[in-house]
Amino acid sequence: MKAKDNKTEICNINGLLGTSGIVSCIGIITSGEDNMIYLEDETMKVKLDLSTAESDGESYFIEGNIVFC
């Protein structure tokens, strides 16, 4: 996330490569043929490791959800 005059810049997943600091992107949760979970947008997809993810009991990680991260 790059703040400019209180505005947030949202990058695509490919734009995050080589970036350091705080950044933001939007993607969709998908699953691959390998039964792994991915965050995907129009530029690429990255494998997610949700093994240590916590939920408040009312949140779910469901294929097809749009995610702002």
Image (cartoon, helix red, strand yellow):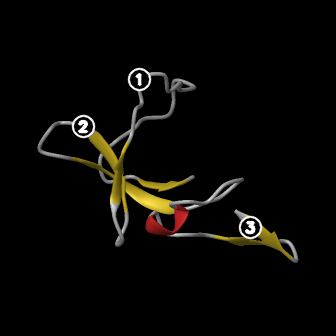
Task: Give the residue at x 32% y 47%.
Answer: 38
Q: Sequence-wise, which precedes: disc 1 or disc 2?
A: 2
In the shown orientation, is residue 54 left or right of residue 27? Answer: right
Say which label, 2 or 3, has the lower sequence index: 3
- The Cα atoms of the two marked residues, 1 and 2, are separated by 11 Å
The quadrant holding residue 5 is bottom right
Image-based side of 6 in relation to 44, left or right: right
**CB contact under 8 Å: marks 2 and 3:** no
Which labelled disc corresponds to residue 36? Answer: 2
> Residue 8's mark?
none
- Other-residue count near label 1 (Cα within 10 Å), few / some / many at <14 / 14–19 / ≥20: few
Of 68 and 57, the residue lying toward us: 68
Residue 64 in the image, given as x and y percentages of width and height:
31, 54
Residue identifier under label 3: 2
> What residue does disc 1 label?
51
Q: Disc 2 on helix, strand or loop? A: loop
Say which amino acid is labelled 3: Lys
Tell me the kind of residue under disc 1.
Answer: Ser
- The front one of 68 and 1 is 1
x and y percentages locating residue 4 in the rendered image:
83, 75
